[in-house]
Amino acid sequence: MIGFIFRRLAQSVVVLWLMSVVVFAGIFIVGDPTAMMIPDSVTPEMRAQMVAALGLDRSPLHQYWDFVLQLLQGSLGRSFATGLPVAELIGSRLTATMELAVTAMIIAIVVGLPLGLLAGLYPERLPGRVITTLSSIGFSLPTFWVGLMLIMVFAVLLGWLPSNGRGPTSSFLGLQVSFLSWDGLKYLLLPALNLAIFNAAMIIRLTRSSTREAMLLDYVKFARAKGLSERRVVCVHVLKNILIPIITVIGINFGGIIAFSVVTETIFGWPGMGKLLIDSINALDRPVVLGYLMFVVVMYLVINLIVDILYSVLDPRIVLGDSQ
Amino acid sequence: MKRIPTILAGIVSTTLIGMTPAHAAEIKIAQATDITSMDPQFANLPGNLTAAKHMFDSLTELDPEGRLQPSLAESWSRVDARTWEFRLRKGVVFQDGSPLTAEDVVYSLARPATLTSSPATLNGFLKDISKAEVPQSGVVRLTTTTSLAVLPNYLAAVPIVSKKVTEGLKPEDFETGRGMVGTGPYKFVRFLRGDRLELVRNDKYWGKKPSFDKATLRIMPNAPARTAALLSGEVDAITAAPAADLPRIQNNQNLTVYKKPTARVTFWVMNQYSDALPEGTDLAGKPLAVNPMKDVRVRLAFSKAIDREAIATRAMEGLGVATQNTIPSAMFGYNPDLKPERPDLEGAKKLMAEAGYPNCFGLSLYARNDNHPTEPIQAQAVGQMLSRLGCKVKVESIPTSVLFTRANKLELGMMLMSAGNDGGDMGVSLEYMFSNPTNNPFRKINIQTYDSPNFWKPLREGLESVDDTKRAELYRQVSKVLHDEAGVLPTTLLVGAWAARKGVRITPRFDERLYAFEASE
């Protein structure tokens, strides 16, 4: 296992390097930040000074090299638009996004797994049909529309929950979090629900089809023949076997929520990272876009590693140390 | 039976009103523009300056109509064409108790030039000042490199900071409240990036005390989110109320809509520089070897073909005012004789025939898809209006970053732009809009290719003139030339829309902003 993790880390460095080259090249093609940012009411000297201060007077290759050098020193550079260090900018938003993503995933799993199992065990009965239909709806409704509906119903019409922003935060392990107080939770609930709906629907469908498949397999028959209770057959044998694809999908989607929950964050005014990315792309704030995407790659690599480790826990036949 | 809930509601609401202490009034405003930095001098961006104005004053200010008013400077005078003296208001103190001095002002006017990492420096307003000195206590004397009539307008955009507390601070220091010591109506409490700015009343403020003890500026760039926040009572007032939601807000008994023409004008830019019109084709689809936009008759024909009234009322859902001027009527230099041109298809066709394009030609129109929501719609509308001249029109909406990059390379034939006249002086924004490498070597970026001596002569004279009456007359002349030569085609002034709950009165402004200290109960 240790060997596996080391090999993975080595591969990760290569992936990161490739990614940085691609992003850097892409960002150069999009446009010239000086055209967007530097007003034309400055003297040529001022302009040259600003271009130099932003490091844009060097050749693209040189700028890339600057970026790599900075990175090796542990710095992602400074944002053009705000003048703040990129790491600080991402860090300040990371807690908000993580909080939202984790809450959404918990809701999705807690709702999705049992309902999916139920629908898979009783596909022809009424509850199974209802769950399947609901999951289709949850799957196909656009996030922004659901978000607006949630706001209309729970904030505007009923007035139960706030419509926008992040509520009061309290300190937890040095981070500012909102889930520790009821006031903060109220702000968290709607955006988390909005993110959870799509994921819950997906988990339901995945669980349902996997369960239906698994129930026909021999090991279920054997387990029953052995006289195990239906409860044990489903909750231990079936569940454990179908969890692997589900965990993979949860892992991928969790990364997606963290990195690109732009729509939800925009609608609910949640000061998270997705919004940061879009704003930075619009402003051609190169250091932030680059730093952000590098961060996302690292995050996906970590999530994939965790998913792989979970595989081996769930299925002893998968040996991580095995080199192929 | 029916009465009981009403009575109950009455009791509940009276209790609630009774429970609200009279001295803890708070206003929550949702603004559409982001705040990128707490450093009041970091960037010339509307969101940043709106926030800064709550905590910092400038030497001068612009009132809600865009007219120049005294602020930290009580009065100012021109010693000669290039020298100004600003007399500071007496008894003004910073929020840390130290008095405002002329040295603080001199320091504040020099500071933006030192913020070299700023993407949108305030130094554009200050670069013409060659010398700033203090001839006597409480007086600042500024010498400019040219005769600069608009200097007081420029200074309205530059917040005055305390020398003592801001020397040597980095942008991130301001986020935590360090350096946030101004002379303004509110004091800094807390800034949550991308979310909100919390403020509390400054009891030592020299001017009119704000009506609200506490103020929160929420950052909500998403339009439906602002509406929802207002409807749910999350905020008391919003800026840039979306057109689609206005009927709904208006129908709500508890809400009031405010509308006002702003100083932001939309106008069509036509490439008059390239030898061949970029992406221009003849009617058979072959690339054009000439540039018809160089012919004033073609530009005038386009102007006649455009129905400005229809754009304002239909395409912009009433959030536009048809105009031929680039500023609202209350502002300095407005030309009342220039009425919005009426659509005249026959006249336009005649002009096109005279210019040698009886059935027009093929061209592309560009608009930005991430600026004002009505811009792509206006582009579609104008595309259809031009096609009635026989033009083969392609309409494209692209992001600002792409549009500017391509426009600077002169790759676009015709595009929709909008420009705000936030400085309160029309001449300044026209100079900014029309400068290009040939007429002003200092300004490298140029997406305007209209360049006419008839236009520049009165504009330059106006910018330098010492006499305000003469200056206004020259500005009117500039607008007339711009219209006669169809340098660009102004179409509408954007109408700003704000909304607030009943019980909160707000003051809509020409620059689309909303200040908590200009609101009252």
Image (cartoon, coloured by chain):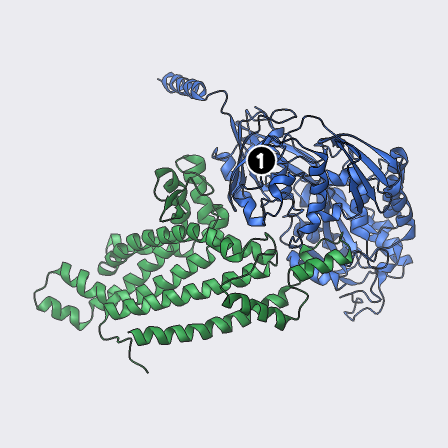
Left or right relative to B124: residue B166: left
The answer, for residue B365, to whether it is visible in the render is no
Residue sticking out furthest to the left: A227
What amino acid is at disc 1? Pro
Q: Position of residue B519 (x, y in %)?
A: 60, 28
Image quadrant assignment for residue B386: bottom right
Q: Quadrant of the N terminus of chain B?
A: top left
Picture layout, residue B372 above or below residue A24: above
Depth check, front residue: A179 or B127: B127
Residue beneath label 1, please?
B247
Identified at 35% across, 64% down, the residue is A249
Q: Quadrant of the C terminus of chain B?
A: top right
Left or right relative to B186: residue B477: right
Residue sticking out furthest to the front: B136
Picture layout, residue B464 above or below residue B7: below
Q: Position of residue B203 (x, y in %)?
A: 57, 25
Image quadrant assignment for residue B427: top right
Identified at 90% across, 44% down, the residue is B461
Q: Which chain is blue?
A: B
Q: Which chain is green?
A: A
Secondary structure under tag 1 reads helix
